[in-house]
């Protein structure tokens, strides 16, 4: 997510208005996680990896804390790689899954932002994400897709080709969808680092608060299969 920063900055400023702030996350210590708690694999780019944040401040650890504080036992494994395109993630998917100590009950797929920032063809992004979700289907691992939006100055044709990728693939693979992962921090510089792309620690908390229920529902559906 490091390249062509102004593109996503424009996207942030172009959206209608910031999302209302969700209720604050609980800050009390979460209860101990049982050894047999279901595993959620966060498979994505720098928005999952915790770019420029201290250990424990990124999305996976904060999501894990929030779920467990709410009584939803889960262990969230961070498989985010900063700078990953959908092609790079597709190449490492099998290795990542094969080397998990416990088979994930749910995989969060958060990719595509780097494709957009580099101006890669949306058809390639769609094909790579489709392949990732297909591999998860083959392994009978449910997925939740967290979406991205194209910057308006990529051009109307690019936007119209890129933005429908996520709802279309979510429908095709019967995967729940968070339409825009950054919606909770959009347009709020206090919740973004100075690159205007990546969330601060508090920004991560807002994203977690906005997405926790979607993840909880997906995990419940996955573990009831």
Image (cartoon, rainbow, N blue to C red):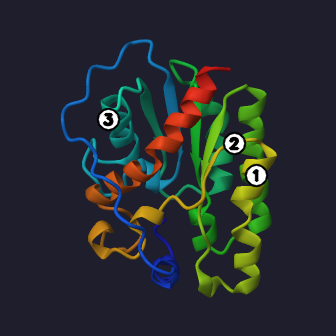
> Does dot 1 land on a helix, a strand or a loop?
helix
Q: Residues within 10 Å of mark 2 (few under 14, many from 20)?
A: some
Residue 8 in sight in this render? yes
Name the secondary structure under disc 3: helix
Identify the element where label 2 is drawn: loop
CA gap, disc 3 and disc 1? 29 Å
Tell which circle, 2 or 3, labels the residue nearer the N-terminal end. Answer: 3
Instruction: Report the number of discs.
Output: 3
**Left-right relation of 182 to 169:** left
Disc 2 to disc 3, C-alpha distance: 24 Å
Instruction: Indicate the position of residue 23 as horizontal and vertical percent values.
Output: 31, 53
Q: Quadrant of residue 26?
A: top left
- Residue that badge 1 annotates: 169
Whether residue 121 is visible to the viewer of this picture, yes or no, is no
Residue 20 horizontal side relative to residue 148, left or right: left
Tell me if residue 187 comes above or below residue 48 in the rendering: below
The quarter of the image holding the C terminus is: top right
């Amino acid at each position: 997510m490091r390249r062509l920063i102004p593109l996503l900055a424009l996207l942030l400023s172009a959206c209608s208005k910031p999302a209302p702030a969700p209720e604050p996350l609980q800050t009390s210590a979460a209860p101990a996680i049982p050894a047999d708690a279901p595993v959620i694999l966060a498979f994505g780019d720098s928005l999952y990896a915790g770019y420029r944040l201290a250990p424990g401040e990124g999305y996976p650890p904060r999501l894990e804390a929030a779920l467990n504080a709410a009584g939803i036992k889960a262990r969230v494994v961070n498989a985010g790689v900063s700078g990953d395109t959908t092609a790079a993630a597709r190449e490492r998917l099998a290795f990542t899954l094969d080397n998990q100590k416990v088979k994930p009950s749910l995989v969060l797929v958060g990719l595509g932002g780097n494709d957009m920032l580099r101006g890669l063809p949306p058809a390639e992004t769609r094909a790579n994400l489709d392949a990732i979700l297909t591999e998860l289907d083959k392994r009978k691992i449910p997925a939740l897709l967290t979406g991205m939006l194209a910057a308006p100055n990529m051009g109307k044709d690019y936007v119209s080709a890129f933005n429908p990728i996520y709802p279309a693939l979510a429908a095709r693979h019967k995967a729940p969808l968070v339409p825009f992962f950054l919606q909770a921090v959009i347009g709020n510089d206090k919740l973004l680092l100075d690159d205007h792309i990546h969330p601060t620690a508090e920004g991560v908390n807002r994203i977690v608060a906005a997405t926790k229920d979607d993840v909880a529902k997906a995990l419940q559906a996955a573990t009831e299969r």
